Amino acid sequence: MSDGEPPQGDNPPTFTAESEEVRSSSTRNQFNCNRNFSGMSLGDLYVIEICAGSARLSRVAHECGFRTMAIDHSAARTCGFPICVFDLTDADDLESLIRFI
């Protein structure tokens, strides 16, 4: 296997250690993600999948208990999960999505 090539076979790669970037407190603080989710259920959290394509991520997150919203410019590729159609190149659609978020 060469660099950048996905692994082959039935055994997915395993990760044994955090990267320096993940361990770095400056990286964590850069995004100001200090919210504590303890005591919350998955249904309290909202997953928004933008440029969802087939919306598989949204479907799986929903099956796990998250509240979800899949967004794409078309619902033509959906895997059976509902997709909210927003054309993010349209200023009105983009503004509506930003207000929702």
Image: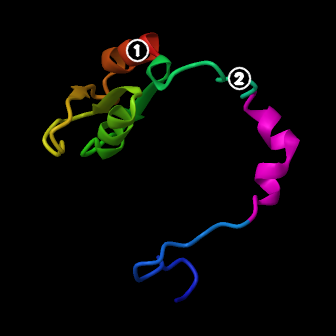
Amino acid type, residue under disc 1 in the picture = Glu
Q: Is residue 56 left or right of residue 9?
A: left
Span colored in magenta: 17-32
Q: Residue at x 20, y 30 (%)?
A: 82
- Residues packed near mark 2 inside 10 Å, few (<14), some (14 to 19) or many (20 plus): few
Task: Please say whether residue 38 is one of the residues in the magenta stretch.
Answer: no
In the image shown, does 43 or 27 lie closer to the viewer? Answer: 43
x%, y% of residue 22?
A: 76, 50
Amino acid type, residue under disc 2 in the picture = Asn
Asked whether the beta carbons under mark 2 and mark 1 sit within 8 Å of each other, the answer is: no
Q: Is residue 96 left or right of residue 25?
A: left
Q: Is residue 51 left or right of residue 77?
A: right
Q: Farthest residue toward the front?
A: 39
Relative to 50, is 86 above or below? above
Relative to 45, is 7 above or below? below
Task: Please say whether residue 31 is one of the residues in the magenta stretch.
Answer: yes
Q: How many tags in the picture? A: 2
Q: Which residue is mark 2?
A: 36
